[in-house]
């Protein structure tokens, strides 16, 4: 077994009644400092457990690409482009001031779900894989795309 | 739920679909995630965003946690990374949320490791406290209230003779030390260190 001085010190400190009481006070305060909405957000996340969709990761974000930002900031600062990639689909997104346009690749028809906190909206993906979300989602959201050929892909959460 | 305070058991149960086990994980570690967010001085909007991202990543990651005891370290590292992403994004947009370049450095690995150790200790103490009989919980709550309650006011509130408060305090604290959660504390701290990787340097 490892001899760990820190463990011994903290255990020794808690053998003292006053120290233990002070530690308990700190522990309960640390919990009280956390707002209930923060805890609820965490509990609600479990709704996503075992969702049977393939996850698409963010592989490009124009805001994160500094070189591109340096070149284009003056002209196109209000347009943000993102790419999500999974094994069976990639999703190109373009966010302007008021709308969100996208295309899935390879192109095919399907249904797009826009999941925000507590709401789900649906829109159509046309035969060339394009879709539009108007107005663009407020706050955090994620997109789930189901196509006629059986692909079911869910993006990570996005905030525009 | 409280008869098994082990993180490992909670992770296993949550992976198998037990919402109560998941809730317990969130209750236990939300203070850790929250404390790290406040270290990065995020706005409450950004804290909500980071919190949501971290828990969602955990939901997706549950079955893949190679070592469930590594959960606190995984949460701390993931939270710190998400906070950095938010801070970096804010800076690129030149929002006045974060001003200076050295603003990132005050949250180093050591600070994160300290948060992990503190979170483990606090979670064990809270779980141990929850195991105590109600009279002990009431007495200890009064003793740690701010400002501290006098023995006279404790007597008024709980009807305990003033002369018995000291001995009862001692007995309740002993029970806390003998609680399952408290006894597991040593293991928890060691696990936190192994995970953090850099602690104790």
Image (cartoon, coloured by chain):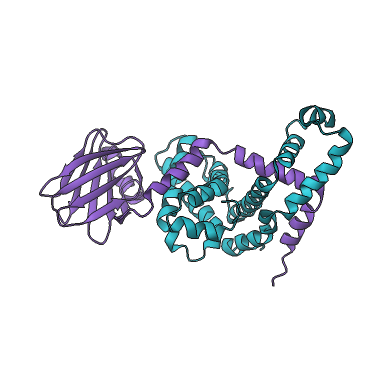
Chain colours: A purple, B cyan
The image shows residue A68, relative to residue B96, as above or below, that is below
- Residue B183 appears in the figure: yes
Which residue does the image show at 61% across and 56% down from the upper left? B113
Total numbered labels: 0
Lateral position of residue B44 relative to residue B193, left or right:
left
The image shows residue B70, relative to residue B54, as above or below, that is below
Lateral position of residue B31 relative to residue A123, left or right:
right
- Residue B43 appears in the figure: no
Query: In the rendered image, which quarter is residue A56 located in?
Result: bottom left
Q: Is B90 or A69 nearer to us in this picture?
A: B90
Task: Pinpoint residue B67: horizontal percent, then vertical percent.
Answer: 51, 65
Which residue does the image show at 54% across and 36% down from the upper left? A35
Q: Is A133 or B135 nearer to us in this picture?
A: B135
User: Which quadrant is home to the N terminus of chain A?
Assistant: bottom right
Query: In the rendered image, which quarter is residue A86 located in?
Result: bottom left
Q: Most extreme residue toward the right, as rendered?
A: B163
Task: Pinpoint residue B55: horizontal percent, then vertical percent.
Answer: 45, 49
Q: Is B159 or A23 nearer to us in this picture?
A: B159
Which residue does the image show at 65% across and 48% down from the upper left? B122
User: Which quadrant is home to the C terminus of chain A?
Assistant: top left
């Amino acid at each position: 077994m490892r001899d760990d001085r820190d463990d011994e010190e903290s255990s020794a400190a808690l053998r003292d009644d006053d120290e233990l009481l002070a530690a308990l006070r700190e522990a309960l305060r640390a919990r009280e400092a956390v707002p209930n909405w923060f805890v609820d957000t965490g509990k609600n996340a479990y709704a996503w457990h075992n969702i049977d969709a393939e996850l698409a990761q963010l592989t490009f974000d124009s805001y994160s690409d500094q070189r591109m930002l340096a070149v284009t900031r003056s002209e196109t600062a209000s347009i943000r482009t993102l790419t999500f990639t999974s094994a069976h689909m990639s999703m190109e997104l373009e966010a302007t001031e008021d709308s969100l346009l996208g295309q899935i690749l390879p192109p095919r028809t399907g249904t797009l779900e826009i999941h925000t906190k507590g709401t789900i909206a649906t829109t159509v993906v046309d035969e060339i894989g394009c879709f539009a979300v108007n107005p663009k989602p407020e706050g955090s959201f994620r997109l789930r795309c189901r196509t006629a050929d059986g692909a079911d892909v869910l993006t990570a959460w996005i905030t525009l | 739920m409280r008869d098994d305070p082990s993180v490992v058991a909670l992770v296993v149960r949550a992976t198998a679909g037990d919402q109560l086990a998941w809730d317990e994980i969130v209750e236990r570690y939300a203070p850790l995630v929250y404390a790290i967010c406040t270290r990065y001085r995020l706005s409450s909007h950004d804290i909500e965003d980071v919190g949501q991202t971290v828990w969602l990543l955990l939901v997706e990651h549950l079955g893949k946690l190679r070592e469930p005891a590594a959960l606190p370290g995984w949460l701390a590292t993931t939270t710190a990374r998400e906070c950095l992403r938010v801070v970096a994004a804010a800076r690129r947009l030149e929002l006045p949320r974060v001003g200076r370049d050295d603003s990132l450095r005050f949250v180093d690995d050591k600070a994160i490791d300290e948060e992990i150790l503190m979170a483990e200790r606090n979670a064990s103490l809270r779980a141990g406290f929850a195991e105590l009989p109600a009279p002990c919980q009431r007495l200890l709550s009064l003793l740690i209230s701010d400002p501290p309650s006098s023995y006279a006011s404790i007597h008024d509130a709980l009807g305990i003779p003033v002369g018995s408060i000291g001995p009862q305090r001692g007995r309740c604290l002993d029970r806390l030390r003998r609680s399952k959660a408290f006894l597991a504390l040593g293991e928890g701290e060691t696990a936190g260190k192994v995970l953090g990787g850099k602690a104790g340097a």
